[in-house]
Amino acid sequence: MNERKITHEGEINLGSFIIPCYVLEDGTRVLSGMGMQNALKMVDDPDDPNQSGGTRLARHLNQLSLQPYLYTNKAADHYAPVICYKGNQKINGYEATILIDICDAFLQARKEIKLGDRQFVVAEQCEILVRSFAKLGLIALIDEATGYQYERERDELQKIIDAYVSEELRAWQKTFPDIYYKEIFRPRKWDFTVNGIKRRPGVVGRWTNQLIYDQLPDGVLETLRKLTPKTSSGNYKAKFFQSLSEDIGEPGLVAQLTSVISLMQISDDWDEFLTHFEKLVSRRREQIGSTKEQLEFDDPSEV
């Protein structure tokens, strides 16, 4: 039997509950069984090992009083769990829309029969979840229609970059256009999505240092440190970019960005881009007699 492998993973944040979610190789969307169980309040204490593992969810799906509502126009194996793998880790889940089917069943049962105490709690939670998903769905549709989803992705990438780019360089980061990041991801065949971005945190920051900041003229950063005043506690009072001259400093940064983006756009893959980039850097060094060390990028097979 072929193992069903996870290609993407994330979390659905519902306020007080988080449901791990996955996409498999064949495109199947899966929710964690334990996450569903907790979100439906089928257990009192999610941390209790005797109530974890999704066992309560399976028990509710087999309750006789709920069968007419759970299986209306549905096959006998409709609620069969999905077993998938993240590397060697086995994960038990359910096809994502199963959660909506469960909610529909409990809400219909609440209308027609007297529910047990726990069943009633679950039904109340089902109503909350259905409303939450409706709101999330509407927001997602608006984001996709307006293109705002890409703004969210850019913001997520910016947070990650800020964690890896040194403090004195972060102030310039806002100068970077979206196309710069997209062109880093494209030749590596990485998904330019929130989940894709989260999987490539440190390396993008390191490459930004090497491709952009390390190529600025010698002494620029040291000069910025000297020009920017500090508070009594030793923190800088202003962003470093505010000390850049409008006629030389900022255009120099933009020019380097433009050069790098152009080289990325004419390259079919990352190796080709690095070849173009190293040629450009070598020629510049020859022209100005720079003594900066040769760049060393991470092995593409390791990131």
Image (cartoon, rainbow, N blue to C red):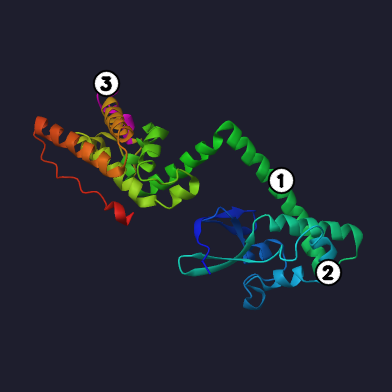
Residue 160 x %, y %:
42, 47
Q: Where, by quadrant of the figure, is residue 46 drawn?
A: bottom right
Q: Earlier in the sequence, mark 3 or mark 2?
A: 2
Q: CA distance from mark 3 to mark 2?
A: 72 Å
Q: Residue furthest bottom?
A: 50
**Which residue shows up at 71% across the image and 68% down it?**
57
Q: Nearer the viewer, residue 161 or 218?
A: 161
The quarter of the image holding the C terminus is bottom left
The residue that mark 2 highlights is 117
The residue that mark 3 highlights is 247
For label 2, the crowd category at 10 Å Cα-Cα, with few meaning under 14, some 14 to 19 and many 20 or more, is few
Q: Is residue 246 magenta?
A: yes
Q: Is residue 143 magenta?
A: no
Position of residue 99 in the picture relative to residue 154 (left or right): right
The residue that mark 1 highlights is 134
Residue 229 x %, y %:
30, 36
* Above-or-below relation of 211 to 9: above
Q: Secondary structure at mark 1?
A: helix
Q: Nearer the viewer, residue 281 or 299?
A: 299
Start and end of the magenta stretch?
A: 240-250
For label 3, the crowd category at 10 Å Cα-Cα, with few meaning under 14, some 14 to 19 and many 20 or more, is few
Position of residue 301 in the picture relative to residue 158 (left or right): left
**Which residue shows up at 80% across the image and 59% down it?**
105
| Residue type for callout 3 | Asp
Q: Secondary structure at mark 2?
A: helix
| Residue type for callout 1 | Ala
Position of residue 105 in the picture relative to residue 22 (left or right): right
